[in-house]
Image (spheres, rainbow, N blue to C red):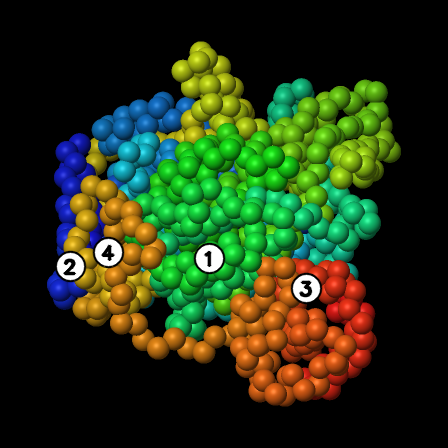
Amino acid sequence: MSMMYSNVILDHGRITSLYVFVNCCTGAKMNHCGLLTAKKEPVPLKSIEVELEVRDHVATVVSTLLYENKEDKPLEAVFVFPLPGDAAVCHFSAKIGQTQIVAEVKEKQKAHEEYDDALSSGQQAFLLEESDQSPDIFSLSVGSLPPGESASIRLEYVTELAVQADDGLRFCLPAVLNPRYQPQGSEGGSVQVTSVPASLVPYSLSFSARVSSPRPISKVESKCSLDPLQYLNTEQTQATVKLAAGHKFDRDVELLIYYKDAHQPTAVVEAGQASAKPGTLMGDPVVMLSLYPEFPQAVMSSVVSCGEFVFLIDRSGSMDCPMDNSNQQETRIGSARDTLLLLLKSLPMGCYFNIYSFGSSYQHIFPKSVEYSEKTMEEALKKVEKMDADLGGTEILEPLKHIYSQPCIPSQPRQLFVFTDGEVGNTKEVINLVRDNSGSHRCFSFGIGEGASSALINGLAKEGGGHAQFITGTDRMQPKVMQSLRFALQPAVVDISVTWDLPKAVSVTVLSPPITTIFQGQRSLVYAQLTGQSPEVAEGCVTVKYSLTGHPSQNQLRFSLKPAEDTGLTVHRLGARTLIRSLEMEERERRGQQDGRVKQKVVELSVQSGVSSSFTAFIAVNKSDSKAIQGPLLRRNVPAPMMMMMSCSMPARLQRCAAPPMRNFMMGRAVSQSLSTQSCDFAAPVMGSHSIDDEVEVAMPKQPRRDPLLQLVSLQKASGCWLLEPALAAALGKTSEEVENPKPSAVNKEVWATILALIWLHGFKSDVQDEWELLAMKAASWLCAQKAPCVTECVEAGNALLGCKVQKDSLGI
């Protein structure tokens, strides 16, 4: 199996592509790792400094990148780097010596022409633009940097912070950019990325954060080492935190921020820009609403017992990597198998389900979704047990198309769960497909491992009306997935509307797309432009109305129209970004059917707000220095650090397979000399489709003992009950005789076994209750339907047997 990376050198307009092939399975090695200069010196990026400011639910990020050209010829450096998918880049400037250059937003083609003209005339130029294929990838071109010269580049963006299942706000600085898999036949070309091991990345990172909120800050957590949190006031509403010294590029910088009373709805009114014309987006106040609709308890106490649940599992080669470096035994695909077990055991009787898996090809367990029963559940679990990371690349578009081609089942709302650790080059195409089918389903997405594309994961959930989760570091996949299943089992909210009650002199223009989904306890952000004059003490009111299980409900939020002090233009820029994204989507849908007015509107809005878009770019040219630069212009791509998956041992079945045609996939990773002959990045696809049952038998090492919780769960029947059998006794840590003898004579075996299982779960696994809560509810419902005698006596006997003190009421029976 071969691997490839590419290095592009630009010499007076002539582009030469150099490809280096490595056959790691035969022990071939490279002499050099990553991209070096002609003199084998490090690339010109020297350091990155990041300052984060979090205000309640939104963040402003300022990054400063320092370049230095140590060559004897002028240099054009290209740095490809990731940002959050919904980020709004709003400032870009450069400092060369004592000269400060501030970039302007211009239409992309004009920006490129101006950049090329500047280089050809010997001027210094900088170009920052968004990838055509994925909104979370930006490339920065540092053009015509003279020999021995340094350049300091400042990049600023604003972004919303996603709410996690445990109510933490997640900020992620993607220190890793994995190469994007480019499926054959997909639109456009791929972004050129070079990756190197973390230890060889020749630039440093410093990171600091300041957090402020109307509510006290409970804590700030990270998988990375942090200095202690420092509170700035006695109310604990302001705090600072820094990344500990010595951070290595082996993981993303992820912060989880927790506030007290996080579910309180809030409104922030931001004053317009003084220099902007009133009546324009930047000239008028903009309000950001954080809404947390609360559903009636009577409705939330029950879950729906219908639905079509479709699970789409990534089986590309990288899924065989460890979940995190501290536990090499638990792989991503292994964790996905365990999660599927919990999901299948937790589904309600009467629903429908199917499981798809994908890599370079895709497979499904059933030709179409089937009714959930003991037979279909067991058939699915047998095939799930055999799932491995053996399908090659990451081509998610085709299985999605197949899923959407299947007719929906009447009275069974479709719920799609997507699990992937991959990054694809056709992110926008995938998200557009989900959006086009958003009326027929809800989509819940899960990004597994470091470097997962936030644009892909968040975009799937946002356009599919679901919820996104990220599983990184030592996170367990199961609790986050079960949280999303609880969302999926909530009754569907329909007929959603938002009405405004404002003073007569004030009108509102909503910038956000209409709210299409609401989940209990989950935030919805709404941006709106407020035009007109309002009295100092004026108030506004927003009412969210919806229907739940046939009953109309509503929630209200009253807020002051007085603009908040010292908020900058964060809310305006995020509002502009929201509107730009909606217009970009509209333009893609109508491409070829209209006269470009939507694109023109996007460009105008982007230029007015100073916020990036897919149709614009930031361009900065230093025109003060008219001295021509001598010598040919060299181009250098600055490497992004690669994932630790490079050191994963290659599965035996992949070691034995022949190399597939290189044209069918894109890989942009460089391989370190230190890699052993049995290690390689195995993201290469195994071409062709095959049945799970037809896999070649391979001698595998002995599997570690199964987790006791999963051992018990695996024995539960689809109806919710357990059988009194030797396997159950073993899972409970008892012999068959020890389990059977205390059973009250008036109670049948299934009831006794089910009560024992519930007592064990509550008595020994209460710390992970969110993982088994739904299947326990199903078991309790089954018990109640049996109307068995002596239930209290059974609970007492079960406690005595297992050494627990679980109350009957806590079992739900």
Q: Nearer the viewer, residue 386 or 575?
A: 386
Rendered location of residue 726, percent (x, y): 55, 80
* Among numbered discs 1 and 2, the one appearing first in the sequence: 2
- Left or right of residue 724: residue 42: left
Q: Answer whether labels 3 and 2 touch (C-beta < 8 Å).
A: no
Q: Nearer the viewer, mark 2 or mark 4?
A: 2
Which disc number belongs to residue 379? Answer: 1
Residue under the image location 40 percent in, 15 percent down = 592
Task: Describe the element under mark 3 as helix, strand or loop.
Answer: helix
Where residue 703 sits, quadrant-wise, is bottom left
* Among numbered discs 3 and 2, the one appearing first in the sequence: 2
**According to the image, label 4 marks what residue?**
670
Task: Quote the CA–CA distance across marks 1 and 2.
Answer: 39 Å
Residue under the image location 80 percent in, 79 percent down = 793
Numbered label tally: 4
Rendered location of residue 380, percent (x, y): 47, 56
**According to the image, label 3 marks what residue?**
779
Q: Quadrant of the N terminus?
A: bottom left
- Left or right of residue 129: residue 264: right
Q: Nearer the viewer, mark 3 or mark 2?
A: 3
